[in-house]
Amino acid sequence: MRRSPKDTEDSARLTHRRALLMGGAMTAMFAVLGARMRYLSVDQADQFKLLAEENRISIRLIPPARGLIQDRNGKLLAGNEQNYRVIITREDAGDVDAVLARLAYVIPLSAEDLDRTAKEMKRSSPFAPITVADRLTWEDLSKVALNAPSLPGVSPEFGLSRIYPRDTDFAHVLGYVGPVSEKDLEGLDKPDALLTIPKFQIGKIGVERWLENDLRGRAGTRRIEVNSVGRVMRELERVEGDPGADIRLTIDADVQNFVQARLGDESAAAVVMDVTNGDVIAIASSPSFDPNLFVRGISHTDYNGLMEDDHRPLANKTVQGVYPPGSTFKMVTALAALKEGVISVNTTIRCPGYIEFGGRRFHCWKRAGHGQVNLERSLTESCDVYYYEIAQKVGIDKIAEMGKSLGLGMRHDLPMSAIAEGVMPDKAWKLASQKAEWRIGDTINASIGQGYVLTSPLQLAVMTARIATGRAVVPRLVRSIDGRETDVPEAPRLGIETEILNRVRAGMYAVINAERGTAKSSRIVDPAMVWAGKTGTSQVRNITAAERARGVISNDQLPWNRRDHALFVGFAPYDKPRYAVSVVVEHGGGGSTAAAPIARDAILRALSDGLPPLTAYPASQRNRIEAMLAKLPLRDATGRAPTATRA
Amino acid sequence: MSFLEYRVKFVPTGLRKILYMNWPLVVLVTAVSAVGWLALYSIAGGRMEVWAGRQMQVFGLGAVLMFLIAFVPIWFWRNMSLLAYLGSLLLLLVVEFFGTVGMGAQRWLEVGGLRLQPSELMKVALIMLLAAYYDWLDVKKVSRPLWVALPVVLALIPTVLVLMQPNLGTALILLMIGGAMMLLAGVSWWYFAGVASLITGSVAAIMLSRGTDWQLLHDYQYRRIDTFLDPTADPLGAGYNIIQAQIALGSGGWSGKGFMQGTQSRLNFLPEKHTDFIFTTLGEEFGFVGVFSLLVLYGLILLFCYVSALQNKDRFSTLLILGIAVNFFLYLAINLAMVMGLAPVVGVPLPFLSYGGSAMLVLLVAFGLIQSAHIHRPR
């Protein structure tokens, strides 16, 4: 088909015009794209650079090694042990089931382990390592490493976990560590980032908890590059953290071990304190438990066993157990009366075996009465009526004042859990807590450490130390943190005349060393270690009128949990006091038979370098003592227990 | 003007044709492709074998095709137009029934290990057919309704087929190519005004009816439109690509993070980083300077196409070259606008850069046609 040249020229011109128009539109679009690019990569570049960095960089924490806890001589009480575990990475393993089956040949794997691994694997990314087995022995780990070629994706790993080499000896003092819980994070404004690490272990109770901030250390950081699904590509920077501070306690691990062993299976508590500086040398609560079980994750059976035991192994009886102090409280009543001047050191009071007040009879433990009793005799023979009388003269408020100045009814600030305040009652206390007026009968009961008075073994040890020194000794558990000694200010004087104190101490001396002393059989014959003390037997039940009518029932006939508590407090050496001791044996019967012998052994152990020297005991007892000492399950020099660990 | 009118004796023959090729275009196309190889090498973490090597092979194959096509006289290709269109249509139908499903749409034909995307082929075939159509059509009849309706139908048939795959991006490009060819051929503005007002009207009706009693679409369809228009509202879903792409582009700054230093692409934050979003890698590693240079390269390609088209006195050649230039421009404009967050995400590759065989091959075939038209232009 022919077209006229005019036609072709016209159409060509039209096409050119429209093409140029379109070219203009294209140029405009180019301008828009260029401008947009400029906006993104020049004007907004900083913001986008930041976003790209945030995409790329992730900061991971490196948990620091937890501080060690040592005894006063540097013996290890809580350390970190290499923990060997085996991890598996799904994407490297290929056929996971086959690899796990082969792994089960190499090391023992429980069905539970395999189950958990499979579950975790389903949840996490293919490159995330999953722990298959934890706490392996070195041998098992070596087997895994040796079989590495046939176990793709499986690798051995090391970590640190807490270990308590002297397990049961320090369970109540140290407590234990465990993974962070919701409860731990409650009430923290800005929790340490470390606490967000899954399964990070922090102190749950005891020293581990209360000195957590010192022990934990500071986290290190790892700046790593991650890709869009969180896989770690490489490490960009690593800043090591600071390990936690090492802590040295005032406790002597060997004395502690001795005391713990000496308490045996009794439900009992004992505290040995250095009266010169307040150092707690031993603080044992029995029965005990193995804190390592808690670190590893305690089984239900074990836990229920501990919970259901009527001897309450989980309770730290030294600070959280409170008991009526019984006759060990008599020094307080005596000192209050002497200080206030309502009696003198020579005042005598007649004990007919009871006093009558408001139609009620308050008996002396000796039904027949003691006759004329002075201060020394009242302590030596533990006459109750003497104290009924002087307590009425001085009044409860003054007794409470004296008790508090001796460290009763107050919380001694040790890094331990559930420290009880106890009760040192006075008129205001009763009004506030019982909504009732104080009665004279209450004073009479309180005068011999019954009624409302409740004290912990720690408080009793403090009281004894203060009587022995005349100074307000404050107990202390931490000797140094990170090598820095905690300073001990000189304890201020109690403000009690030396003469009065001396007479009370003389009474305590006579309790042990006089012919009629209640703890005569627990005397120490070594002149350098002669000691003084006071027995106590406190009722845990009200004696009903019916029982009274039937007459006094012997403790042995009662069920265990209704028997009297046995108590003893003492200090040694008498002429130059060094250590104070307190022992409470729950439902142990009489203080002189159940508690005093333990207290004597404990204080002798503290005074000597090794086992208590037999020469310190009266000759007639030596054979029995020697046999008893030989049977004690003591640890060897390395801290290892003699037999399998008792849970 | 038919081929009989060509002053054939001035048309170069034999190997001399090489001298008459539009060499600047060849160089520019090779340069842009080379940028693509660099980018693919970098994204693969410095490995050739992942993408870059294969892309180079495809380019080599395409370049051979380009030369072969260039050496064949343009009038032969004009006469092949209808056949090419029908052939492409057939392939589209085949892919509709036997195609491989990829990215949730049927797009590919597996032919001897080569993935063929008939919709790409269709674009060039449509351009050829419409250029031939308007070359054949009497200029006076161009704006008559019947002669307007025919090319509209020719464009709509493949558009509907591609839309059924479904591939919205390519369907839109096919429609726009049809429109551009008609515009260039001189179809009256009134038709364009009519279509434009019709589209505006229906869009307005659809959007305005939302929430009223006479709502035209379902609620979920509206929500889809919302995420389509504003992907940032869904940063981890639909908006993830576009947000990460902008972070990559913006973090490049003025001069970029350096070759192989892009963190966004290397660490896999960018999806589709080697295909539709390859531009972001360039932006991240070479910054504004690099991206601007690339835009200049693209602009020069278009410029040389324009010069060649407007110099050419053959109506088929002019329309063909312009049509291919428009196609090329639509690719890159839509891709760049999408990557920079100016347009919704539609699957459109960046010409000569994105990894992918059929787009690259078809583009080189199209540039072969441009070369053929250039060599065999009437003098």
Image: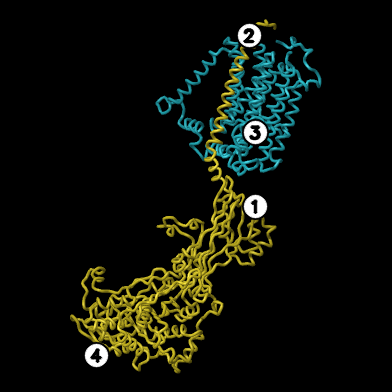
Q: CA distance from mark 1 to mark 4?
A: 90 Å
Q: CA distance from mark 3 to mark 1?
A: 32 Å
- Horizontally, residue A137 falls left or right of residue A517, namely right
Residue A586 place in picture, x, y as percent: 38, 78
Q: Which of the chains is yellow? A: A
Q: Earlier in the sequence, mark 4 or mark 2?
A: 2
Element at badge 3? loop
> Which tint is chain B?
cyan
Question: Which numbered disc covers residue A92?
Answer: 1
Q: Which three-letter amino acid code belongs to the residue tagged 4? A: Thr
Circle 3/circle 1 CB separation < 8 Å: no
Circle 1/circle 4 CB separation < 8 Å: no
Q: Label 4 neighbourhood size at 10 Å, few (<14), some (14-19), many (20+)?
A: some
Residue A387: quadrant of the picture: bottom left
Residue under mark 3: which chain is it in? B
Question: Which numbered disc covers residue A10?
Answer: 2
Q: Which three-letter amino acid code belongs to the residue tagged 3? A: Ser
Circle 2/circle 1 CB separation < 8 Å: no
Q: Are marks 2 and 1 on the same chain?
A: yes
Q: CA distance from mark 4 to mark 2?
A: 145 Å
Q: Mark 3 — residue?
A: B354
